[in-house]
Amino acid sequence: MRLRKATALTASAVALTLAATACGGDDDGGDGGGGGEFVIGIKFDQPGLGLMNPDGDYVGFDVDVATYIAGELGYEPDQIVFEEAPSPERENLLSRGDVDMIVASYSISEEREERVDFAGPYFLAHQDLLVRADYEVPDEEAINDMTLCSVSGSTSAANVQRDFAPDAALEEYNTYSECLTGLENGAIDALTTDDSILAGYAAQETHQGKFALAGLQLSDEYYGVGLPKDSEDLDAVNEAITAMVEDGSWDQFVEEHFGPAGYEPEPAPEIGARP
Amino acid sequence: MSNLSVLYDAPGPRARRRNVYYAIGFLAVLVGGAWWLVSTLQDKGQLEWSQWEPFFTDSRVWTTFLLPGLENTLIAAGLSMAIALPLGALLGIGRLSDHWWVRVPAGAIVEFFRAIPVLLLMLFANEAYALWTDVDRSVRPLYAVVTGLVLYNASVLAEVVRAGVLSLPKGQADAARAVGMRKGQLMLYVLLPQAVTAMLPAIVSQLVVIVKDTALGGALLGYSELLGSVGLIDGNYANLLAAFAVVAVLYIVLNFLLTSFASWLEGRIRRGKRSTGAVLTTDMNEEMAMAGDVPGATDGAAGGGGPGRT
Amino acid sequence: MFDFLDLDRYDLFGAFWTTVQLTVFSAIGSLILGTLLAAMRVSPVPVMRAFGTAYVHIFRNTPLTLIIVACSQLLALTLGMTMWADVGTDTMGFRLAVLGFVVYTSTFVCEAVRSGINTVPVGQAEAARALGLSFAQVLTMIVLPQAFRSVVAPLANVLIALTKNTTVAAAIGVSEAALLMRDMIEQEAQLVPIATLFAFGFIVLTLPTGLLLGRLSKRVAVKR
């Protein structure tokens, strides 16, 4: 008898778990694919570009650009659904039709253009170094003697080893902020990636005054708006970007998100510019 | 040898004094290490209030980042447990079947999925759902995480159940047959309940593994579980180490609750049932529970049974 | 199907060799630390018993990824314990990863050994004490040798789990199999064949280990 009671107890525990999870599942199931929605892939954890803030809203330069473009395409802000677009997944998200558009510090490259269409570019960034505020980087030669850090598998990391500092020691971690721990404590000399991303970290409240951009333009990164191959929205998105630059919104977004970091990016690039 | 004091004599005055010296020395090392840790962290500014403040003063850290992450971890872990437990029992029984065409495939499945890292299983599952099903993107990572966890843990649980059944005295099966039970009844009413009871701690430790392994889905599949919320918190407050520490505490508390619940449940099941004849007794199992991902999950030759005890 | 497999470009065997090295070093380390912890948990000194119990409960309940990242973030980058290797070198990442695996896996070894101690009949220890052996002597000469023989199988399972767990070292940039896999997927964009290849690699590593040690466990088991 006792055993039976215990079995019943286990069964009810399992049933409870199931019920609880079923409720949880419903919450997630609602979005995506519904009528009139426009799904945009952005970053969720990149200060300055695309970040989920404590209120659950999304803020950053890419977010504003995406919202503006969606507005020009005829979507109200409440029709926009933001999805996280992790870097290695971006092409797959577009080709599977999981998202309609990606605005996530997405550099245009030949390899990527084989799999997706790019509108724009809407921004020109350069690979740069983020160093401690009291640290001087005289020239590109000096990078060879430094300990660098970047995210594993990223193009920035590959550039370092291939192009401008083959002798530099390179640490690779999962996220940029893991590099920052080492940078702050002197275990690492510089964090390297696009200056737009670096500016976001330098401007974080608890980091202010600690780090500085070295100001080296190590590469040209043209950020494009990723669209599925042969998308019919391509021209409309290009027109939206042109309008955004012409009516001053672009400058306003730059000022709002990069101003606090003291980062002054290049003027908006020409539509159709390629590396 | 559950009463461990058999390993040493009751300490006399001299031994007691020596033990005190040992204790003091050991404590000194511990305290020294802790002091060094705290002071270095202090030097590096990691213990500054600003790093930790958000967790105490800003409730949005919890409502926006940590609690949804915890909820997703619980959903994935709960679903995986609910599916993996029965599936594991089925596979375990299948491996004990008299028919080779049940035994061999069940054995192959178990050995195969036990040999592959869970992370890879999740990746495969994610790709398979994307290619061949129309599971919506918003729930696909969840499906992939649960599928990977179920495949791996069901295989492990199958071995645990099998070891449990094999550890039972032969008399149980003989007696059941003698009263005319069929094979299915024998397994369902006699062997399985005893095996599950005997192996409960091992099963629970596997459930803890499930909770921890949900974290693997975050990094590669973008499933927003508890560990993944560290990145979001750090993006807003730039307090990586503090965020890691808080999340670690949450995991430890969660798993501690799980194991405590299990030992309470075990106590209820076992009360007054010490004479079932199962070779594995309570104390024995408490230890076996922790012997690794597949504790005692062998064919009873070694760790599975502890025939030395009475 | 496997035309992406450019062995000049991708050091497949090197990566799996790193996986094997990670496994072997971590296994040796965890065996030592795990046995020490088990000894602490059965020792006559209450402080040591408490420490052993707390250690096992804390580290067994924390996800491995967290432990590995903590090794790199907290120990190496914040506290400056670089394991006698230069910052930014592969050696540092490797040693930190081994340390993390030892910290985590030793909890499982400890509990396996402790369960092995429980399978040793009480009479063995009583006889040893009757001969006047001290705690350390009882443990190292009488109980542990018998305990180990009865937990070969659970330890084999711990070893297999450890082999697969080494994939987590990719999180701090140790160039083992999982990191190479991530690179190859990124560059070749062929997820399924590449993942299949690596899954096969792990089967090759773990299946024979399991079978061999399973056999060994039957041979050395103490017949009672």
Image: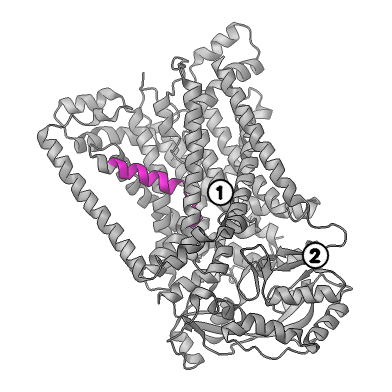
Q: Is residue C81 visible?
A: no
Which colour style is shown? one colour
Q: Label 2: which residue?
A: A78
Question: Which chain letter matches label 2?
Answer: A
Query: Image quadrant for the C terminus of chain B?
Result: top left
Residue at figure coordinates x 30%, y 45% from the top left: C36
Residue at figure coordinates x 17%, y 34% from the top left: C134
- Check disc 2 and give the amino acid type: Asp
Report x, y in % for residue A275. Answer: 71, 87
Foreground residue among B153 and C143: B153
- Number of residues whose C-alpha sits closer than 10 Å to that of mark 2, classed few (under 14), some (14–19) or many (20 or more): few
Query: Image quadrant for the N terminus of chain B?
Result: top left
Foreground residue among A90 and B30: B30
Q: Label 1: which residue?
A: B213
Q: Magenta stretch: residue C60 in it? A: yes
Q: Could you say which quadrant of the image residue B309 lies in?
A: top left
Highlighted range, magenta: C49-66
- Number of residues whose C-alpha sits closer than 10 Å to that of mark 1, classed few (under 14), some (14–19) or many (20 or more): many
The residue most toward the left is B14
Report x, y in % for residue A15. Answer: 66, 32
- Check disc 1 and give the amino acid type: Asp
Report x, y in % for residue A54. Answer: 61, 63
Against A86, is C131 above or below?
above
